[in-house]
Image (cartoon, helix red, strand yellow):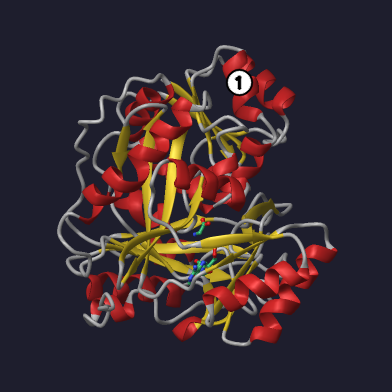
């Protein structure tokens, strides 16, 4: 099987590494990729967001499967164009990807499918926003309807700050979603969907803030670990039964079947399970940790989903060892990350037992003698992922790897998976 993977980041590096472990996968291609991906497979300088360019590449390669990594190509209609041209695609249509693209649309589908989520009101002006804030009370949660990846969300005790965020969304032409505050730890659960059936991966936890102890601004994600020892028995089955399957059923009824990953962003609250958000793709950096443990061949699984041939009874196999992934980011991330610094120590980190380094924002450069240097080329530069006997050891190993990698201004959190390893995470009681 020949697979084309779209996207430039750490998630795509992880997907490609897992595909290469599948004996049915004979060839993998990437567009556009990064330095880590280029060391594994052929990369193509094609705009992953262009339906025409991607379809032409898939035709040239005679791809048996196209896997869409990020959200942008989904929104741009790349999956639709590929399906139209006859390719099996793992990734939803632009219509189905609205589950991620519009919070108001996601709320509408959840209401229709009886999926538990935060109570919410859509506000169109400042007076409406003020009424909704006062209806729910503090802490206030104000979301820009159009913006994904946590960037448009403000959670605050300060009513003035909440109103100011709403005002700035209205000024830029967006509507605003105001929600009740959800207490309790967050979980990311990725569910593979073929339009009708669902197969869950293993739950993970992401760390969205830039600094230790969840301080500072939101980022794309600074680290992840999996599985989650503090979850109640039967958690994953409950998410499938109450969240993923009803959502997939509702999308099918609407005539916009969901094929791809339904990323369920959840809170485990004192009043039970609640959806915080849906995404229409694998999460980054959770995927780097989750796929490190996957023993089931990934290519065959994604092809079955793309072809509508899951039966929903699939039981995936996992490495028993937990995985911890720590993101190393460039100086000034998430504002305006500095680029172009030479990275050292990647091979030394990968020499550690159970450690792999997954590239995100990197590129490579050759000097006159043909020596290769890997340079930073984005905000999140790479993730060091370690598998080990228990969470504490996986953490220690990942940080040993981080300690071997360096470039000027590199930053990382030091507390990824620390509270879980210490048994300090609990679900609030009512
Ligand atoms: P979102 O873009 O909807 O994922 O929101 C980004 C982050 O804001 C989430 O990962 C949560 O940490 C936080 N958040 C969003 N909605 C809520 C809520 N209703 N209650 C508490 N925290 C929330
Ligand atoms: N890790 C969060 C995301 O992928 O959106």
Residue annotated with mark 1: 82
Vertical comparison of 55 with 20: above or below = above
Give the residue displayed 55% in from the left and 34% down from the top.
96
**Total numbered labels placed on residues in the image:** 1
Quadrant placement of the C terminus: bottom left
Q: Quadrant of residue 42?
A: top right
Instruction: Using the image as rendered, state which of residue 172 and residue 379 is in the foreground.
Output: 172
Image position, residue 270 (x, y; %): 30, 73
Vertical comparison of 163 with 220: above or below = below
Give the residue displayed 78% in from the left and 71% down from the top.
167
Give the residue displayed 69% in from the left and 70% down from the top.
129
Give the residue displayed 46% in from the left and 47% down from the top.
111
Q: Is residue 34 visible?
A: no
Q: Point out the residue furthest to the right here.
A: 171
Instruction: Using the image as rendered, state which of residue 24 and residue 366 is in the foreground.
Output: 24
Instruction: Using the image as rendered, state which of residue 316 and residue 280 is in the foreground.
Output: 280
Instruction: Using the image as rendered, state which of residue 404 and residue 325 is in the foreground.
Output: 325
Instruction: Left or right? Give the position of 125 relative to 412.
Output: right
Mark 1 neighbour class, 10 Å CA radius: few under 14, some 14 to 19, many 20 or more? many
Ligand 2 neighbours mark 1 (CB distance < 8 Å): no
Q: Is residue 9 visible?
A: yes
Quadrant placement of the N terminus: top left
Vertical comparison of 251 with 342: above or below = above
Q: Secondary structure at mark 1?
A: helix
Q: Quadrant of residue 49?
A: top right
Q: Quadrant of residue 47?
A: top right
Image position, residue 284 (x, y; %): 49, 55
Image position, residue 240 (x, y; %): 29, 44
Image position, residue 273 (x, y; %): 32, 61
């Amino acid at each position: 099987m020949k697979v084309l993977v779209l996207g430039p980041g750490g998630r795509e590096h992880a997907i490609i590494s897992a595909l290469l472990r599948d004996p049915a996968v004979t060839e993998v291609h990437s567009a556009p990729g990064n330095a880590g991906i280029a060391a594994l497979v052929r990369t193509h300088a094609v705009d992953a967001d262009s339906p025409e360019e991607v379809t032409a590449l898939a035709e040239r390669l005679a791809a048996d499967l196209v896997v869409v990594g990020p959200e942008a190509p989904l929104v741009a209609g790349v999956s639709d164009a590929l399906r139209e041209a006859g390719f099996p695609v793992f990734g939803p249509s632009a219509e189905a990807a609205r589950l991620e693209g519009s919070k108001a649309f996601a709320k509408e589908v959840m209401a229709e499918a009886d999926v538990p989520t935060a109570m919410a009101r859509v506000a169109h002006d400042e007076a409406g926003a003020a009424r909704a804030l006062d209806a729910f009370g503090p802490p206030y949660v104000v979301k820009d309807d159009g913006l994904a990846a946590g960037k448009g969300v403000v959670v605050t005790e300060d009513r003035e700050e909440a109103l100011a965020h709403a005002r700035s969304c209205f000024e830029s032409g967006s509507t605003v979603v105001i929600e009740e505050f959800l207490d309790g730890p967050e979980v990311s659960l990725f569910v593979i969907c073929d339009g009708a059936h669902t197969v869950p991966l293993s739950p993970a936890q992401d760390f969205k803030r830039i600094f230790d102890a969840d301080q500072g601004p939101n980022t794309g994600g600074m680290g992840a670990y999996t599985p989650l020892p503090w979850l109640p028995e039967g958690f994953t089955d409950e998410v499938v039964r109450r969240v993923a399957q009803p959502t997939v059923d509702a999308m099918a009824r609407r005539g916009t079947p969901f094929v791809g990953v339904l990323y369920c962003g959840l809170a485990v609250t004192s009043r039970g399970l609640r959806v915080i958000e849906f995404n229409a793709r694998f999460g980054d950096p959770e995927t780097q940790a989750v796929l490190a443990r996957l023993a089931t061949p990934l290519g065959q699984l994604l092809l079955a989903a793309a072809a509508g041939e899951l039966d929903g009874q699939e039981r995936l196999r996992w490495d028993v060892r937990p995985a911890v992934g720590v993101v190393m980011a460039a100086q000034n991330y998430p504002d305006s990350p500095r680029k172009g610094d030479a990275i050292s120590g990647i091979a030394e980190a990968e020499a550690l037992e159970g450690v792999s380094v997954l590239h995100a924002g990197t590129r490579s450069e050759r000097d006159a003698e043909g020596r290769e240097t890997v340079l930073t080329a984005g905000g999140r530069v790479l993730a060091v992922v370690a598998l080990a006997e228990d969470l504490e050891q996986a953490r220690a190993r990942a940080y040993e790897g981080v300690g071997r990698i360096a470039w000027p201004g590199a930053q990382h959190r030091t507390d990824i998976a620390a509270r879980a390893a210490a048994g300090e995470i609990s679900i609030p009681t009512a």
